[in-house]
Image: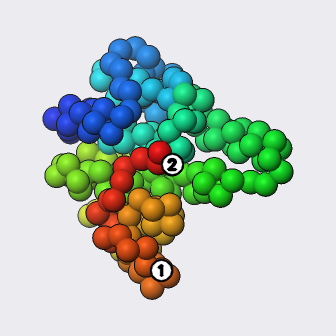
Amino acid sequence: MYHPEALEPIVAFLRGIGMQVEYGEGGLGGFLPGVNIHAGAIHVDPETLKGPGDLLHEAGHIIVMPRHFWPLLNRNVQTDIDNILADQTARDGVADPVLTRAARQGEFMSQAWSYAAIQHMGLPQECLFFPGSYQYHEYEGKHPMQAWIEQGTHFGLINLAQAGFTGYAGMFAYMGDNGLAPFPQMAKWTLD
């Protein structure tokens, strides 16, 4: 595992923001090695986990949803979010903008949210951006995803700002002012 020393601080952070994290073989069979989601709870198998930042990434997919939807999220979070959006839209006749953002921009939001969480904890970004993460196996210098976020052109920045997690930053700083400190400072870690 890359940066095993970051596992406990990350688990403590996630539990501190109200996420349920369980250790054991429940982490097997997930979307990422060593981490799985069952009814909104993150299950981690430290023996097969590639990097502790993967927990943050999967948590980021959960946090883009209002908390009352978390128990409906499982292994394939994107499919679950799409299904929740489709059910809500069919019932109400209008797509909820929060659910639509989660369904369409959740991956970007999760990436930027994870970056901000690592910054907040004072951990090295390499525990999130390691060789093989985000499909980048070989690169020179900074991980390409990390560089994209730090350049201020990553779409997660604007989506987190529009959702009220953080202020506008990077190239999106000119698109609005929600009165919050700019990314990567976070005003909140979850939707309620």
Residue 89, position as x, y percentages in the image: 78, 47
- Circle 2 SS class: loop
Residue 180, position as x, y percentages in the image: 35, 70
User: Along the horizontal axis of the image, is 144 left or right of 123?
Assistant: right
Q: Which residue is mark 1?
A: 176
Whether residues under marks 2 and 1 lie with C-beta atoms below 8 angstroms apart, the answer is no
Q: Which mark is residue 64?
A: 2
Residue 175, position as x, y percentages in the image: 50, 82
**In this view of the protein, can residue 30 be seen by the observer?**
no
Q: Answer few, some or many: residues within 10 Å of disc 1's Cα (few below 14, many 20 plus, some between 14 and 19).
A: few
Look at the picture and state if 49 lies above or below 133: above
**In this view of the protein, can residue 189 be seen by the observer?**
yes
Look at the picture and state if 19 lies above or below 27: below
From this viewpoint, which residue is outermost toward the bottom? 174
Q: Answer few, some or many: residues within 10 Å of disc 2's Cα (few below 14, many 20 plus, some between 14 and 19).
A: many
Looking at the rendered structure, the number of numbered marks drawn on it comes to: 2
- Circle 1 SS class: loop
Q: Earlier in the sequence, mark 2 or mark 1?
A: 2
User: Along the horizontal axis of the image, is 164 left or right of 71?
Assistant: left
Residue at figure coordinates x 51%, y 66% from the top left: 162
Residue at figure coordinates x 53%, y 44% from the top left: 66
Rendering quarter of residue 23: top left
Residue 78, position as x, y percentages in the image: 61, 41
* Residue type for callout 1: Gly
Q: Which quadrant of the rendered structure holds the N terminus?
A: top left
* Residue type for callout 2: Val
Look at the picture and state if 170 lies above or below 93: below
Residue at figure coordinates x 31%, y 64% from the top left: 184
